[in-house]
Amino acid sequence: MSKKWIYWLGAPLALVLMTTAVWSAGYNISVSLDYTGPYAVIMPPFDSTRKALTAWWNETKGKKLGIELKDVGYDMRYDPSVVASTWPGILSKDKPIAHMGLGGPDVAALMKRLPDDKVPMFMSTATYGFSWLPNTWVFQPRPTYAQEAAGFFNWVHQNLIKDRKIRIAAINSKVSPAYVDMINGIEAFCKATPWTEYLGVEWIAMKPVSLLAEVRRLSRLNPDFIWIATNTAHVISTIQAQKELGIHIPILMASHNGIDMSAVASKDIKLLEGHYDAYAMDPGLDPNVPGAKIVIEYCKKLGIKDHWSNLSVQAALMQLMVFKGVERAAAKVGPDKITGQAIYDAMFQGPLTEEELLGLAPALTFTKEAPFSTKNLRVKITTVKDGKQVLLTKDWVPIPDFPKWVAQ
Amino acid sequence: MAILPCGVHFETYRQHLAYLRTRSQWTAFILLLLLLAGLPYILNVRFIAMISMATMISIAVIGLQITTGYAGLLNLGQSAFMGMGAFVCGSLAVNFNWPFWITIPAGGLGGALLGAVFGIPALRIKGFYLAITTIAAQVIFPLIIMHLPNRWFGGAIGLNLEPARLGSITFNSDISLYYFIIGVAVIMIFLAFNLVRCRVGRALIAVRDNDIAAEMTGINLFYYKTLAFAIGAGYAGVAGGLWSYYLRYVGADQFTLYFSVWYMGMLIVGGLGSILGAIFGTFFIRALQEFITALAPILVQYLPQTGSAAIWFAGMNILLGGIIILFLIYEPRGLYHRWITLKTSYRIWPFPYL
């Protein structure tokens, strides 16, 4: 009888021990998903980016630190009642060290309890004035929608309209406090900025049949730009109304209803010729940005389709902030002692550089005063030129300072 | 009136009308209360949070049962009435620092007032036409909140609340909030059971069955129809008050038509015209929702062959819809009817028929 059986048993045992040695600590990151609510359409790029970046981090940084991160997704249906009732179970079962939220329902349901639960939440949407609160345990890579728009108008002031006031009008809807907050923000910006003039807003329904009357009314005020940060239906209807009136007033869009999303909705990017979008993150046009390269490479490795776009950038930013928090916490408390509190504290240890964020956002410096970085705010601007979405300028454009419009 | 075991008889009218009439009924009721009190020691906190949320929603659905199930008035604005209650409760707590035992009833009153306003057209219109006017409540509600001065209801910002407190007890943990919600729910359910058996309840049932005949017998239609809306919306307002203390942040976009439709679905699945039906329907639908929320990540983890999580997550919604459709086909009278059938079968066992 040979001793072969020792090798047969020993080899797998050694493998298990090796693996255990490599992954000395494993942590869960919970994720709010929405496959059955209004944001089901954006889930494929969110899903592929999340898988790719988790695989990348575990294989590169995680292995060195002896940490394996695992993300656990829950379909919250974009419903605060589902988030509120699911969250205690997530806490007890998964014991997450961080949570990645999708939007308003996560903030509404968790904002007040996160400091007690000691779990920081990371999101990638722009912020709203009403969530601009101190000590929220929420971290967002982007400032408010109004600040992102202000960044664009700053570029216009420096490059296009230098000798007079920029005349700004808006189209928006009163169905959601978030939308009303956008208008409050842009009003505050115009009030505080001498080179702008706020002309007014047309409040409309979420799915308008025609915006002819509203656009005609706005056009009589001679605006230089119409700001629409609500949805793609508003953008497309406004462009159609302009065509019927034979006018062209450039529209400024946000990320969620921006050029790529409106082009998908209208199935004709040429319709968006001469219009703009601006937001405080990379627009996902260049596959050579370090973050894009990694996601594309790891999607290929994992055999999943990559959907690189500004939606992927949003998904990636949430994760990169979590990764940096974990790396900093590991350095401070040790890889096997990472907690939500350690990650929360780590977020205030200094700026996250553009390199650390893989070129997908400008440097972010978090303080306890706001859920977003309030220093050196910057945006990127894109437009449609000759039927193609292009960056207006390769550099980040600074956002001018203006006072907070929401008194808490 | 459900059948009773052989030999059980009553000597007074009061005994005959009592809800709990036999010793075994009292025993079952006390056991139920003990079970509710002991659940946090038995169940995982996940289930406790689920029960808290379902209980909170069931108060709003009981209100809908009073308006729709008992008075026969279609209402698709229950979520807006709940929102009104949440904002009134939140505003009083934030601006005046009033305790929850004043703010929650005041929230109920706020919901009731808004409900009464939208109930007025019920005198002239019925059915789907009435449903449309209640949808108007749903549309107008966020506008009311956003247009009133910010110091009233917080406007677009919403309201941030401190946790409810009773002496030295602070209701800020999942367990303490469970007891808080169960306590309020027991009171509201007790009131509902009695309401539907009293003069008002009988009048509402008469209005539902034939409003012209009801008027002929002396029932003031305008009064009772408006009252039905006010009471139903008042229940929603109380649920909204609990919601505001549960999340501690109230925003106008938390109370949408989508939820009103779900509440109507819970009512239909539970069974129209019974308080227990409203509770059954709410717990059944919420349990299904929670089940599919929990099941999908497990399927994604253990059956990754599909290549995309979307299939499982979206498939869960189809499963939810499918179960509800099957339920309505095979038990259109709702869960309450199934419960009565079960109870009767147990009482007459081993005989198959009455």
Image (tube, coloured by chain):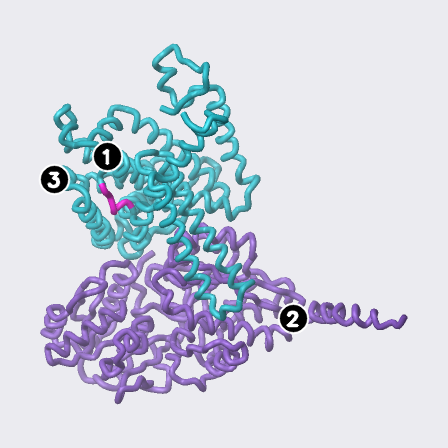
Chain colours: A purple, B cyan
Magenta stretch encompasses residue A222: no
User: Considering the numbered disc 2 on the image, is that residue within a helix, a strand or a loop?
Assistant: loop
Report x, y in % for residue B145.
24, 51
Q: Residue under circle 1? A: B71
Snapshot quadrant of residue B125: top left
* In this view, the mark in front (3 or 2): 3
- Give the vertical position of B337 relative to A358 (above or below): above
The residue range painted magenta reads: B74-78
Q: Kindly identify which numbered label has been placed on residue A66.
A: 2
Which residue is identified by label 3?
A: B124
Same chain for mark 3 and mark 2? The answer is no
The crowd level at tag 1 (other Cα within 10 Å; few <14, some 14-19, many 20+) is many
Real-space CA distance between mark 1 and mark 2, rounded to the nearest whole angstrom = 65 Å
Do the dots labelled 3 and 1 sit on one chain? Answer: yes
The CA distance from mark 3 to mark 2 is 72 Å
Looking at this view, name the residue that lies furthest to the front. Answer: B352
What SS does tag 3 mark?
loop
Kind of residue sitting beneath label 1: Ala
Give the structural element (helix, strand or loop) at label 1: loop
- Which chain is home to disc 1? B
Q: Quadrant of residue B202?
A: top left
Q: Where residue B109 sits: x, y (%)?
A: 27, 37
Q: Earlier in the sequence, mark 3 or mark 1?
A: 1
The N terminus of chain A, quarter of image: bottom right
Picture layout, residue B1 above or below residue B56: above
For the image shown, how many numbered marks are present on the structure?
Answer: 3
